Image: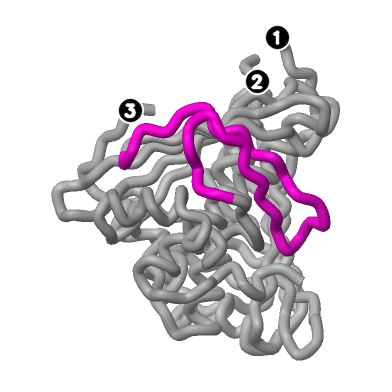
Amino acid sequence: MTLALTVTPVVQVGMLIRRPPADVFRAFVDPAITTRFWFTRSSGELAPGAAVRWDWEMYGVGTDVQVTAFEEASRLIFEWGAPDARTAVEVRLVPWQEHTYVRINERGFVGTGDQIVARVADSTGGFLTMLCAMKAFLEHGLVLTVVLDHHPAGLELQS
Amino acid sequence: MEQPRFEVQLKIQKPVAEVFDAVVNPKKLTGYFTRTASGPLVEGATVRWSFVEFPEEFPVRVREVVTNQRIVLEWESMERGYDTRVEMTFAPLDDGATMVQIRESGWRPTPKGVEASYGNCGGWMHMMCCMKAYLEHGINLRAGGVK
């Protein structure tokens, strides 16, 4: 069977975080907070036009991040990924009651149809994992270790 | 090109028997994933799950259950009219924790099928994160996660 991609797939995930938009925005911007639930090291805070580096030290991976939109407590866009496969991530904070619905889109995937379909699935799972960890931290003060426990060191499983 | 499919995984810091029970036992499953579950996952049974986001119940056909190792389910694609197949595996780790992997396949190779597969990919990753929070920390992370 062949799959004809008429539209390049995008990542689209969301979750309600029961904290005010200003707090949720701060959690994305301030690496002292973000490192409790996502990457483990950052070269600096997000700011308008900022270029930073994020690392996941337990996996030995990292990415350069370029902020292209920065709207306080409302919206962020950044580009990240390998130089030949940059994608754009938009984080929108939608107020709901006194809380925040976090909507994440990622677009700009390149590759063969098979590669794009697989990359979008991987990224969908990755952002869901991050949002769960963010929710656990901001609402419960818990470090859920879901990013760390996604790929335990040295573990080989059949696929 | 292959049909849309995905695989998600997460290590849960609990023994395999406890993790397995958190999936098959409806009293536990409703503590972090479904709103209701009509019964335990028993091979050959059809159980009904409901979720806070959806008004309807979803029949889940239990095709295979190997205690503490493997569960195979089939349920209707969100594209409707045909089933997809969910395979869960549970692997005990040396440190007493458990690696859970969930694979789902069977969508049609259409743009709508691909989109439906992403919905479930995120859904199962969400489920495993909530299972981890439930088993390791005793909280329901799914509650309040959707409007």
Q: Residue B82, percent across and down?
A: 76, 25
Label 1 crowd (10 A; few <14 / some 14-19 / many >=20): few
Q: Residue at x 29, y 50 (%)?
A: B17
In space, the residues marked 1 and 3 are separated at their CA atoms by: 25 Å
Is A73 on the left or on the right of B9, as rendered? right
Is A52 on the left or on the right of B132, as rendered? right
B59 part of magenta stretch: yes
In space, the residues marked 2 and 1 are separated at their CA atoms by: 7 Å
* Residue holding disc 1: A1
- Is any atom of residue A118 visible in this view? no
User: Quadrant of the rendered structure where residue A156 is?
Assistant: top left
Query: Between B106 and A79, which is closer to the camera in this rendering?
Result: B106
* Residue holding disc 2: B3
Q: Residue at x 66, y 50 (%)?
A: B49
Quarter the N terminus of chain B occupies: top right
User: Quadrant of the rendered structure where residue B50 is?
Assistant: bottom right
- Residue A78 lies, with reference to residue B48, above or below; the image says below
